[in-house]
Image: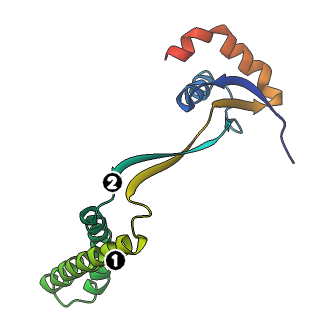
Amino acid sequence: MTTNREPIATCRTYEEAQKTVDYLSDHGFPVRGTLIVGVGLRSIEQVVARMTYLRAAGWGALSGAWFGLLIGLFFGIFAATAVSMLTVMLWGLLWGGVAGAIFGLIAHAVLGGKRDFVSESGLVADKYEVLVESEHAARAHELLGRENEQWRKQ
């Protein structure tokens, strides 16, 4: 069974849309089933740094160290004493870091300069619409219309 929904607000940012839903919730509106819909989605990739061999080795070492620590924890469970457990964990951390650094260097070298940067990706929308179930739309319009400016400033 599909529920019909109606737009009750259009916002420029996701935070404004969240404030709209929060305002409705604070005033006893049944927000269950309310949707915040991003309209005009775009993928954005922001370059944050240049990828160097040192940075590739560093990121590889960090991820390898985490993996090595997890392996060390797993094998450490079977250790006879707390000292041997700690020793196994530290060896896992060390060898995971070394292996990760080597892997990071090799992976960067294999790319041959095709992706010499570090970036963050995300989705953004041109606008965000707040939709509520049709049977509650009139009440939402009433709440939002009554204090239109006040709820946006909160």
Residue marked by disc 1: 106
Q: Position of residue 108 (x, y in %)?
A: 36, 70
- In space, the residues marked 1 and 2 are separated at their CA atoms by 17 Å
**How many residues crowd around disc 1 within 10 Å: few (fewer than 14), some, or many (20 or more)?**
some
Secondary structure type for disc 1: helix
Quarter location, residue 129: top right
Kind of residue indicated by mark 2: Arg
Q: Residue furthest toward the right?
A: 1
Q: Position of residue 96 (x, y in %)?
A: 27, 78
Q: Which mark is residue 119?
A: none
Quarter location, residue 109: bottom left
Pick the residue in front: 40 or 86.
Answer: 40
Secondary structure type for disc 2: strand
Kind of residue indicated by mark 1: Ile
In the image, residue 151 above or below residue 135: above
What residue lies at 73% left-to-right and 14% top-to-bottom? 142
Q: Position of residue 44 (x, y in %)?
A: 53, 44
State the scheme by which the image is colored.
rainbow
Residue marked by disc 2: 50
Mark earlier in primary sequence (1, 2): 2
